[in-house]
Image (tube, helix red, strand yellow):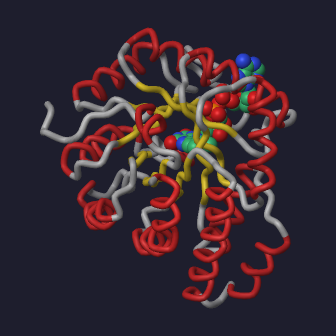
Amino acid sequence: MRLGAIYMKINELFESKKVVFSFEIFPPKATSSIDTIYSTLEELKDLKPDYISVTYGAGGSLTKNKTTELSSIVKNKYGVESVAHLTCINSTKEEINIILDDLKFNGIENILALRGDVPEGGNHKGDFKYAYELISHIKKRGDFNILGACYPEGHVKGRDLKEDMLHLKIKEESGASQFISQLFFDNNHFYNLLEEKEKLGIKSPIQAGIMPVVNKKQIERITSLCGVNMPKKFIKIMERYEYDKEALRDAGIAYAVEQIVDLISSGVDGIHLYSMNNAYVARKINNSISSIINSINK
Ligand code: FAD
């Protein structure tokens, strides 16, 4: 069912804009109603992001079946282009096909195709071992625009950035035409990744993934799971304001804004803000950088 929203494959955005700006959200817990996200979406929509992406069972959560529903709401109710994340590590081709049909039925044209984390112990069932296999399966199956993930510090289970980037090239050759990076707190990691990209002749645009810190424990858990380093400057901020929620949030926003201004001024293709469903933080960051983005996109 198409409800009159805009319909766009977001690769077209990268052709028309110098800097693409997007948010990432996650579906409410399986036990909560999808309605709990409406007030967040109402606020995010007003910030006019280029698109909003919706995670798929991230962190082993049981929210997979809400990704299509929420991606459809973003697009068809709020009129913001959406990107549905999709992981494949424990899925058969038949299971993936059902989801692809559902996405298509809901008018979703953009998929962030991921492997997903291999479960503890390394055992997994399913027809896919790596994201590039999912990418080429989606490419063969339907008219979707496909994005992939990349890792400025290398994937946590990979050998190093150089090897990881060879695999990124395979993802591009398999049909991904834009990439979103893992979060990072030192822009030099992202610039190293761009150098490797250049050397390998990878043409697809890469958006830099930025996560503002609002909670010390949460960010420590995420960085240790993802193998992301925290620079001294960043650790100092977290330790200084650990017990003052508001101060930590504001320092986190300022840190993210500083990263983004440097990235945009250095000519990156886009910024993907891991908004963590926090519309206040997204708005503050958006307000601080919108004139910069508008100036570049003029
Ligand atoms: P791959 O590209 O398959 O890479 C995984 C590892 O395998 C890497 O070490 C890579 O170097 C290696 N590799 C790749 N190809 C080959 C090959 N041909 N031969 C040998 N080795 C290879 N997870 C969720 O569960 N839900 C989400 O919604 C979600 N969203 C994400 C969004 C972003 C922007 C990012 C960066 C990550 C997200 N993740 C999400 C996490 C992601 O699922 C994990 O990082 C996962 O471990 C790897 O996924 P991938 O798609 O990068 O896998």
Q: Does the rendering let one see residue 119?
A: no
Report the front residue among 122 and 39: 39
| x then y, percent, for residue 161 | 82, 36
At 23% from the left and 48% from the top, the residue drawn is: 79
Quadrant in which the N terminus appears: top left
Q: Position of residue 186 (x, y in %)?
A: 77, 60
Determine the residue positioned at 38% across, 51% down. 27
Single out the residue that lies furthest toward the front: 298
Asked if one can make out residue 183 in the rendered structure from this viewpoint, the answer is yes
- The residue that appears at 29% across and 64% down in the rendered structure is 46
* Vertical order, 247 against 269 (above or below): below
Residue 139 x, y percent position in the rendering: 46, 14
Question: In which quadrant will I find the C terminus?
Answer: bottom left
> How many numbered marks have been drawn onto this rendered protein structure?
0
Left or right, 53 with respect to 150, comes to left
Residue 177 as seen in the image, left or right of residue 3:
right
Pick out the residue farthest to the top: 140
Identify whether 46 is placed above or below 6. Answer: below
Q: Looking at the image, in which quadrant does ligand 1 appear?
A: top right
Q: Nearer the viewer, residue 30 or 55?
A: 55
**Residue 158: percent from left, percent from top:** 81, 34
**Placement of 70 over or under 158, stated as above or below:** below
